[in-house]
Amino acid sequence: MLLLPKSPNQKLKLLYLMKILTEKTDENHMLTVPQMINELRLYDIRAERKSIYDDLEALRVFGLDIESVKSKTTGYYVASRNFELPELKLLVDSVQVSKFITYKKSLQLIKKIESLCSCHEAQALQRQVYVANRIKSINESIYYNVDKIHKAINSDKKISFQYFEYTIEKERKYKRSGERYIKSPYALHWYNENYYLISFDAFESIKYFRVDKMIDIIITEQPRDAKEQFAKLDVAAYTKKIFGMFGGEEDTVKLEFANQLIGVVIDRFGKDVTVIPTDSKHFTVYVNVAVSPQFLAWVFGLGDQARILAPQDVVGKMKEHIQTVAANY
C-alpha cells in the first residue's frame, strides 16, 4: 500500500487545533470532533477521532478551558478567555471615541481586539464601532509619540522634538522656526480628549505640550532636570487647578454658584470640594486655581448662575474679561 507523504503542517496539529477552537467556538458556537477533523483538513492536516480526543485533553492540561455539551452529538468550545465580551466591547468603545487615535489606527486596534474572541463574538464587536461624524486625529504619529514619551520617562532621559501649530490655511507652522525643544518629560495628562506632556525645562518651570502637535521625538542621552521639583508635585491636584491646559498665577478663589450647578462643580473640582450654602438657591466654594483667561471664560460660560466673589484682583480680571468680550459685539 502506497503511503501519502505527510503534510509539513502535520507536526503542528495541536497548535492548529487550538487556533480553530479559539477562533471558531464560544458558548453559543461549538464544534464536534468530525467538524474539527474537517477544519484541520483546510490546513492540510489529517486526523483521526482518537487523536482529537487526546489532543483536547492535552490542551486542557495546557490550560485551555475546553467544555463539552452533549445532545445528539457532543460539541466542544472554549469556555473562558483572558477577556470577557463586555470587557472587549469597552475596549473597542474606548478606541473608537478616542480623538487622538486616527481612523486608520482605530481600525487596526479594533481588529487586534477582535482576535481576542471568537469570530462570532467579533461580529458583535463590529456593531459597536460606528460613531456618527466622529472627529478623529489626522496625526498618525500620536500613537508612537505616547510610547516614546513613556520610554523616556522610564529611562530618566530628556526628549528633543519639534512643535507646530496650525495656520488659518490649515497648514502646519513650526514654533520657533523649527528649532527643537529639549524638555524633561515627567507625565502625560489626558484632558478634553487630548494627551498633554507635563515637562520641566532647564529653569525648572512646568511646561505643557499637546502630544499630537509634537513631531520627530528623540530620546536623548541627557538625564532629566528638576527631579526634586517633580517629586514635590501632586500632578492630579495641580492639573485640577488649571483650565484648558493653560497656566496662570495660582490663587484661592471664592466662587458662588446656583444650586443646580453642583454637578458641574463636582465634575470640575472633585467631590472633596467644600460646599458652603449661602441661601436656599446658592452655594459658595473656595478653590485653588491657575487664574487664566480660560478659567475666566469657564466662569463666564456659566452665565448668571456663577460669579467670582473674591479676591478683588480676580474679580477685576473678570470684569475686564467681560468688557473685552462685549467689545467684540
Image (cartoon, rainbow, N blue to C red):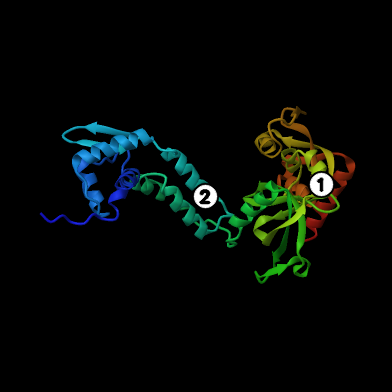
| Residue named by callout 2 | 95
Q: Position of residue 17 (x, y in %)?
A: 30, 45
Quick check: marks 2 and 1 in contact, CB under 8 Å? no
The quadrant where residue 75 appears: top left
Q: Is residue 144 left or right of residue 316?
A: left
Check the picture and name the quadrant holding the C terminus: bottom right
Given this view, does label 2 or label 1 mark the residue nearer the observer? 1
The type of residue carrying mark 1 is Ala
In the foreground, 157 or 286 = 157
**Residue that appears at 20% across and 38% down:** 50
Q: Is residue 236 above or below residue 16?
A: above
Check the picture and name the quadrant holding the N terminus: bottom left
Q: Secondary structure at mark 2?
A: helix
| Residue named by callout 1 | 226
Q: Secondary structure at mark 1?
A: loop
The type of residue carrying mark 2 is Val
